[in-house]
């Protein structure tokens, strides 16, 4: 029985629908992947210009059979030799473009590394705030103000903002990632809605302290992975008012206290503790409840019950739309895109991918960590879909739908953690 990987064809036999695998180093050809299904005559022309005598193809992944092989005439062979310099020039131009894309990727990676460090530093500040609020309230509030100002300096100075998926391995205390996620998403949404710096600052402070009342909730309830019973839920719902009391003792402004009190109030009156309607809820609190709900959907205590970022947004927009102020909700979807960071996807070329960054001004063309079909160490690369012609996201999937190879290459986290940076102008 012939091994599927041992089929070879001459470049002249290629046609649209044939699945090929190039036995070349990734940087020795101009394509994003070393193996792919041919989708255009332009791809065939480029493949022919690589000067290969034979190309490996995979029959069971092909939609078409290779063309019959016709040996070139003496005249054709002579023309091929005479055109070698032109061919080389075309390939060199394509390779140069690929090197530029690789350099852009390396700059983005350096930017992401810096973003990871900033995320880790912010997470440590949040952890310290939670432990120090009852010991040194003045110092804790000062640290919170400094953190919000630092994030605002980045958000409001840079024109383009990219939202990144963080690996979440900086600290072991996942409890504080929720607080930081809510703060990051709230500030980002406030910026998108063109709120004043003062309003966004108030929103950021409230986000950092919105769950401070959970310090009074027993861990057996706070960390429970099963559904809370009625008594446990009643106790949990008191954390909003306990948070107000703690924040008040710390000297936070009344405008911040109001948002903490209302961060679980839904616009349809189904929230708590006062079951307020939309008109009764502070406009900034409507933003806070929106991002808080989203992160709770995506990062539940029982990770098996967590929604994917794509599912979380879809659920909020289709099933629970009445709970949220439509203005902030629409802005939120525009910021995160249809496929927010952390979303696992299948691309139009049948590769698995993980959305790692979204440019807030171009949310439909995110950056995706892609697992190709190769089995070597280079089978996970980052594609910027804004600059990849012909490759789109086909659909969102769950982690259990990944192949074993894709799961190893993409290593999807059980928690979604976000931070932002200036988006590199390309």
Image: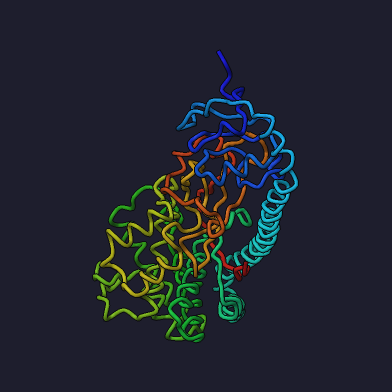
**Does residue 373 sit above or below 237 in this rendering?**
above
Q: Is residue 217 left or right of residue 19?
A: left
- Residue 144 in view (yes/no): no
Quadrant showing the C terminus: bottom right
Could you tell me which residue is drawn at 62 percent across and 46 percent down?
A: 31
Could you tell me which residue is drawn at 62 percent across and 44 percent down?
A: 46
Numbered circles on residues, count: 0
Could you tell me which residue is drawn at 69 percent across and 48 percent down?
A: 91
- Residue 318 in view (yes/no): yes
Q: Is residue 300 left or right of residue 279?
A: right
Residue 241 on image: x %, y %: 38, 73
Could you tell me which residue is drawn at 59 percent across and 26 percent down?
A: 70
User: Which residue of the protein is positioned furthest toward the top in this rendering?
Assistant: 1
Residue 280 on image: x %, y %: 28, 81
Residue 146 on image: x %, y %: 61, 79
Using the image as rendered, state which of residue 148 and residue 22 is in the foreground.
22
Using the image as rendered, state which of residue 409 and residue 8 is in the foreground.
8
């Amino acid at each position: 029985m012939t091994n599927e990987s041992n089929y070879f064809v001459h470049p002249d036999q290629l046609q649209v629908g044939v699945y090929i695998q190039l036995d070349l180093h990734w940087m020795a050809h101009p394509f994003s992947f070393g193996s792919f299904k041919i989708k255009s005559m332009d791809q065939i022309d480029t493949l022919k210009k690589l000067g290969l005598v034979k190309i490996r193809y995979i029959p069971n992944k092909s939609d078409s059979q290779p063309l019959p092989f016709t040996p070139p005439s003496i005249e054709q062979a002579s023309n091929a030799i005479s055109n070698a310099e032109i061919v080389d020039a075309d390939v060199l131009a394509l390779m140069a473009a690929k090197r530029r894309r690789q350099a852009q990727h390396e700059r983005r990676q350096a930017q992401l590394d810096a973003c990871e460090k900033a995320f880790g530093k912010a997470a440590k500040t949040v952890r310290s705030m939670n432990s120090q609020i009852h010991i040194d309230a003045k110092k804790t509030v000062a640290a919170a103000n400094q953190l919000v100002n630092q994030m605002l300096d980045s958000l409001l100075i840079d024109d383009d903002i990219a939202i990144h998926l963080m690996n979440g391995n900086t600290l072991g205390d996942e409890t504080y990632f929720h607080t930081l996620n809510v703060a990051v998403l709230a500030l980002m949404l406030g910026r998108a809605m063109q709120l004043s710096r003062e309003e966004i600052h108030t929103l950021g402070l409230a986000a950092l302290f919105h769950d401070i009342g959970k310090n009074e909730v027993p861990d057996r309830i706070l960390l429970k992975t099963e559904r809370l019973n009625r008594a446990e839920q009643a106790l949990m719902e008191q954390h909003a008012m306990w948070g107000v009391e703690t924040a008040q003792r710390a000297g936070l402004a009344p405008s911040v206290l109001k948002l903490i009190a209302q961060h679980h109030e839904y616009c349809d009156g189904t929230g708590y503790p006062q079951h307020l309607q939309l008109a009764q809820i502070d406009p900034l609190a409507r933003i806070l409840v929106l991002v808080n709900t989203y992160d709770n959907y995506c990062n539940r205590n029982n990770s098996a019950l967590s929604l994917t970022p794509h599912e979380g947004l879809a659920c909020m927009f289709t099933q629970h739309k009445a709970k949220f102020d439509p203005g902030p909700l629409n802005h939120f979807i525009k910021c995160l895109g249809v496929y927010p960071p952390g979303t696992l996807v299948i691309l139009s070329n049948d590769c698995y991918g993980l959305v790692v960054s979204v440019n807030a001004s171009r949310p439909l063309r995110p950056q995706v960590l892609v697992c190709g079909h190769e089995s070597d160490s280079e089978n996970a690369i980052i594609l910027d879909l804004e600059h990849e012609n012909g490759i789109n996201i086909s659909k969102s999937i769950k982690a259990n739908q990944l192949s074993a190879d894709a799961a190893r290459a993409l290593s999807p986290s059980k928690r979604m953690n976000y931070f932002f940076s200036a988006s590199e102008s390309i």
